[in-house]
Amino acid sequence: MAFNNLDKTKRRNLIVLAITKLIHGFGTSMFTIVYQPFLLELTNSIVLTGLIVSIGSIMQFLPMPIVGKFSDKYNRKYILISSIPLYIIGLLFLILANSYSLYYVILGIILYFLGFIINNLNTQFLVAENSDRSKGMIFGFMFFSYFAGTIAGSFFIFLGKGLHTKFYFIFFIGLLIIEGIIFTFFLSSGTQYYHAQRPAIKNINNEKENMWLKVLKTKNLRTILIFFTLDIFAYSIALSIYSGGLNDYYNLSKENIAFISIWLNIGNAAFQIPAGRITDKIGNKKTLILSQIFGFGFFFTNIITVILWMNQIRNTVLITLSIGYVLLALSVCTFIPAEQTIMTNLGEERKSESYGIISFFRGIGLIPTGILGGLIVENIHYIAPFIFSAVGVIIELLFLLFYFHE
């Protein structure tokens, strides 16, 4: 296995990161399942729910350049640990929220997703910096661990029928405390090691001024930026209102949604390591093409499900939605190793800031999707966002074929 060729410190760090990915996956899965139905219950509006979801989505990307800059400048371990209190405070605001205090919801979501991007970016770069070769394989293993945790989180909700949504937020806080303790005492700070791995940054002010222009002017970086921005826009039109729509259109309960999500999580866990191997073997471009084919299958399956529902064929809804989630899992698994290999290798210096800048532009592509998805549902039909997303995936495939290079 790829771990065997690493030195002791790198191997220990990767094991620590894999364990915390498992724990984090458990909590994130619970949050993801109950998040949109929780908002819909508070707002009683699919449009307002989509708008609030958009705020959370924006927070996953827009602060990325600053987070990336700090990650390059300071020790990644301590920046990573700082994500834990942000997560916890965000969840506490959600626990305090009700239909008369939506500002608590918005503040909680801002803090939660700020914690998310700090945690996610620094974890990915710690994985990359502790990997020698076979990055796709190691990223695959990390996300296998994460998705194994999401399976447990989905089962927990599926078996916990009758528990209040806010209980899951409280339980997630407990998991985050455990995660923070593991980071603090078992993850190597690696100050000397990381300074040796990352070249010294000279003329920092000039670099700060030129990095944005460099991303926009460099052909390969610009192509990467366009593709990942297009990708997040195409997928998020439908996904931004997906869980809320399952509850609103099909009248599925939290337990029904958890059952469907189990298949997504099982697929993610089962396919992640093989997808990492495939990425190392066939390259990033071909893997991303494969991902888009599976993604189109997910949207097509949801279109078929809506058509069956409209024609009163409703006893198959959980089956077809589960098949769709398996296809989405295949899309996610083939996307992640290629994406992270590309995004953590954008240059010799200031890799995190380059990552953050591209993520910033991806965030711009994400801004309108929540409200757009909600408006499309309310003014056209529930099937419409899936059609828009399917067309977007076809455009992505054409872009990959004609403009994207290894």
Image (cartoon, rainbow, N blue to C red):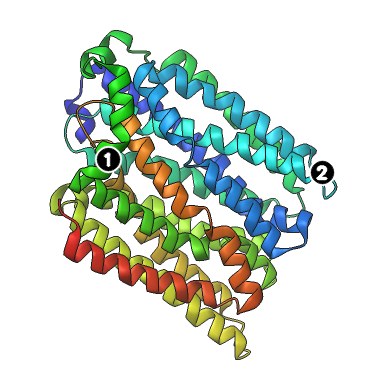
- Amino acid on which disc 2 is placed: Ser
> Which residue is identified by label 2?
101
* The quadrant where residue 314 appears: bottom right
- Amino acid on which disc 1 is placed: Val
Left or right side of 7 for 26: right
Q: Where is residue 346 in the image (x, y as percent from the top left)?
A: 24, 37
Seen from the viewer's position, the closer of residues 163 and 54 is 54
- Mark 1 or 2 closer to N-term? 2
Secondary element under disc 1, as helix, strand or loop, is helix
The answer to whether 22 is drawn above or below residue 312 in the figure is above
Left or right side of 261 for 268: left
Residue in the picture at 77% in, 48% down:
164
Tell me how many marks there are: 2
Residue in the picture at 19% in, 60% down:
403
Q: Which of marks 1 and 2 is in front?
A: 1
Q: Can residue 160 be seen in this view?
A: yes
- How far separated are the C-alphas under marks 1 and 2? 41 Å
Q: Return the residue found at the far right.
A: 100
Left or right side of 220 for 320: right
Circle 1 Cα neighbour tier, 10 Å, few/some/many (<14 / 14–19 / ≥20): many
The answer to whether 250 is drawn above or below residue 141 in the figure is below
Q: Can residue 152 be seen in this view?
A: no
> Which residue is identified by label 1?
215
Secondary element under disc 2, as helix, strand or loop, is loop
Residue in the picture at 50% in, 49% down:
151
Which labelled disc corresponds to residue 70? Answer: none
The answer to whether 75 is drawn above or below residue 272 in the figure is above
Circle 2 Cα neighbour tier, 10 Å, few/some/many (<14 / 14–19 / ≥20): few
